[in-house]
Amino acid sequence: MDDFHKLSEAEAVINTPRQEEHEEEVDPERSTLHRPLLKENQTLSSNSIAVVGVGAKVSHIESLDYEINENDLFKQDWRSRSKKDILQYIFSKWLLAFLIGLLTGLIATLINLAVENIAGYKLLVVVEYIEQKRYLMGFVYIAVANLLLTVVASVLCVCFAPTAAGPGIPEIKAYLNGIDTPNMFGAAPLFVKIIGSIGAVSAGLDLGKEGPLVHIGCCIASLLGQGGPDNYRVKWRWLRYFNNDRDRRDLITCGSSAGVCAAFRSPVGGVLFALEEVATWWRSALLWRTFFSTAVVVVILRAFIEYCKSGNCGLFGRGGLIMFDVSGVSVTYHLTDVIPVVVRGILGGVLGSLYNHFLHKVLKIIGSIGAVSAGLDLGKEGPLVHIGCCIASLLGQGGPDNYRVKWRWLRYFNNDRDRRDLITCGSSAGVCAAFRSPVGGVLFALEEVATWWRSALLWRTFFSTAVVVVILRAFIEYCKSGNCGLFGRGGLIMFDVSGVSVTYHLTDIIPVVVIGILGGVLGSLYNHFLHKVLKVYNIINEKGKLPKLLLSLSVSLFTSICMFGLPFLAKCRPCYYNDLATLLITTNDEAVRNIFSINTSDEFHIFSLILFFILYCILGLITFGIAVPSGLFLPIILMGSAYGRILGIIMEPYTKIDQGLYAVLAAASLMAGSMRMTVSLCVIFLELTNNLLLLPITMIVILIAKTVGDCFNPSIYDIILELKGQPFLDAHPEPWMRNITVGELAHHKPAVVTLSGIEKVGRIVEVLKNTTHNGFPVVVIGVVLPMGPPNDVAELHGLVLRAHLILVLKKKWFLQERRRAEDWEVRQNFTSMELAERGGKVDEVRVTKDEMEMFVDLHPLTNTTPYTVVESMSVAKAMVLFRQLGLRHMLIIPKYQAAGVHPLVGILTRQDLRAHNILSAFPQLEKSAGNKRGH
């Protein structure tokens, strides 16, 4: 909320005990357990920035209503729904998921088709000029063509849809976190994103189309859910089910996964990207729908690619479903040398086996061995999952009850929450051990086992399965020599149909670890410098439309000069090719394919690769942030693959790893170091490269890079969210938030505006005009207690939304006298679908002087079950609850209910829980705020 205007003295506001409580003399001998966590040294009323809530830096953007508004109309609507209505709703959800995948796949094909042909024919003309030694004409042609393409993209973004500039992923992440991002998912951003991304990528700018495709998928999802754009909206009856923020959130999640799938042709990677990087709230049913959407995208892409292979689509169609195919590479790393890297994981696995041998759970193992060996129609995956969970539980508690280890550090896990996390890790490790499928183990725990999930648990289970794979790999390689009898022929892949021979060498672990560390360091440096550049760009963009256009054109001209002129520095002899030109005078996709190519150790000179790496570091920093649709994935892949190839050339005398494999691993490490993704990134790279044998070392590289990057700064998307001022709530509260309670936080806010159960129309109009609040607590005086006559006890009846109050005024649903409305009166005037609308502005409502004296019964419209917390709850715990439940308002109630005690202490919104705003109200927390929180 932007402002907190004080109402007149006649308004019924809560004057919760503030200064009176703290002016009482405090007993110095009183136990510290009964003292407030913080002394109030100031109130927001004395602060120059107090009018905007708890502190400063408050965004004007509002939150979304993900909470189910359980008022009388909602309950009546659910009671009246027939089985046909429920089946129609379920069918509609799957139909929309299908349409999201279908349209995203078609638009992605259109974009790829246009980019490949526009850029391809442009470069063919340039090559002709170069062959004719008309270098100046070649430069003029490519510069003018790139400028024209950039002008188209930039003008559309600046003049018609400013929200279409950039990747759009940070805003999508904010929306799914519960932040309303206006004008983000309309028809105009969709159109501009399509045309703009074609122009920007075809212009050769150092950006990709994966970000725009994610945004396009979300726009399609949003428009389908609401029946089209605002001015031409279809009014089909079945669309009424999706006219709420909760279902729109699910549709946009499907759209984001479909967009990633369309960009990388990676269906599983698209689902995992939405889960790990974008979505704040997740459930297993949503996993199936996103998977269905990505499956439709893949089918559409596959169909068009097969059609285009015959030459019907110009220069498009050669890439196939796998964009950067390195399936033919000979994977020659020695996996047993991963032991020094994951020594703790291996020791944990060995100790877990010893525990299992000596404990009573060994009966489970013996039973499974006997049953499977007897040829019964069953498998060992169930017992292995159980075994993994038992190991996790025993490790967490220090052993069995009778022989428990009393190590001091084990006390941290002596609670149900941490035991739950450990058992989740154990279940994923068990599936991995059964099927030798690490990513499958994580997904099994997510989809089938776990009820409660968070991103930090995702990569802990990922780490557990990585350790399992390493141990299995080591033992399988050892057993292949015949030391284990008939065991060992299966290899890491149980049902191997690839025919690829995999061998390992001793020294290969060193460059693998180096790649991971470099990826984390370089990713953090890239984030740091990009943060600085974007700050400068923000200043330029605030000057107006012309500076935005000039900035875009300047970057385009600089890119053209570099790409055309730098190949002349890498001169080649007659009848030889210019290796730098093969990377620069081509599309970005083709450049990645060239660097990823295998068995090409002499194809690129190290000087050309260094020059290419430096150039794309510069272009990546200055290109992202201009007013064109852009993506971050491809520029980072280009930078990472270049430094990986350089490392491959340096390490060639000492290792057998192919240079193309070095490029793949380095690209994955740099993306992990910058974006801090793990599981989804791993799967995306596997589906990009079509080589499952890269899985173990890809996992190790990504984990190392993410860990190193987390030591320095946040992910690039978190940095962008901060720059945009989005009130994004992180999954991890700051440690110092445990030192303050929500009650203390509420005392630093202005008094909360409340309404009565039956309120005057004039009072409602006055409140709506004088405040920008989106929710108002409804307090009823004179409650009839279970025993005894009515009295003056106040009861918190619930919360009524601003949009519902405006709807009441628009419909003029007024009562002549102060009384409760009948049920038939409510049903006659309102429907649950109308209550799901966003509502308008109070200035649009016209109320006469006589109507001001009438009354409104707010009881039927009030959410009688809002989420409430006790005033003694810490802010850290409240923030986690607020985020996980997707709330817009959180009501604070007193710890003790008694006569004369008001039923409401205060109300918290997203803005109040932002760290910067809390620190502005409590400057004494600054010292502890300097400590970095861990992940």
Image (cartoon, rainbow, N blue to C red):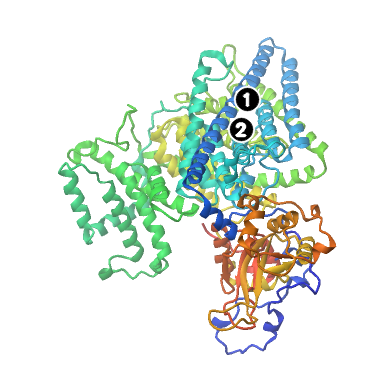
Reply above or below: 834 against 623: below
- Nearer-the-camera pick, 455 or 133: 455
Q: Which mark is residue 333?
A: none
Left or right: 251 as drawn, with respect to 567: left
- In this view, the residue in front, 454 or 14, is 14
Label 2 packing within 10 angstroms: few (<14), some (14-19), many (20+): many
910 above or below 39?
Answer: above
The quadrant holding residue 927 is: bottom right
907 over 492 or under it: above or below? below
Q: Position of residue 370 (x, y in %)?
A: 16, 48
Q: Secondary structure at mark 2?
A: loop
Quarter of the image where one finds residue 421:
bottom left
Residue 331 visible at all: yes
Q: Secondary structure at mark 1?
A: helix
Q: Are marks 1 and 2 in contact (CB under 8 Å)?
A: no
- Amino acid carrying label 2: it is Lys
- Residue at 50% over, 35% down: 294
The location of residue 303, given as percent across then percent down, is 49, 23
The residue at the far top in this view is 132
- Tell whether 879 sits left or right of 327: right
Q: What is the C-alpha distance between the residues marked 1 and 2? A: 18 Å
Residue sitting nearer the eye, 545 or 709: 545
Instruction: Point out which mark residue 584 bears.
Output: 1
Front in this rendered view, residue 533 or 752 = 752
Which is more N-terminal, label 2 or label 1? 2
Residue type, mark 1 in image: Leu
Q: Which residue is mark 2?
A: 209
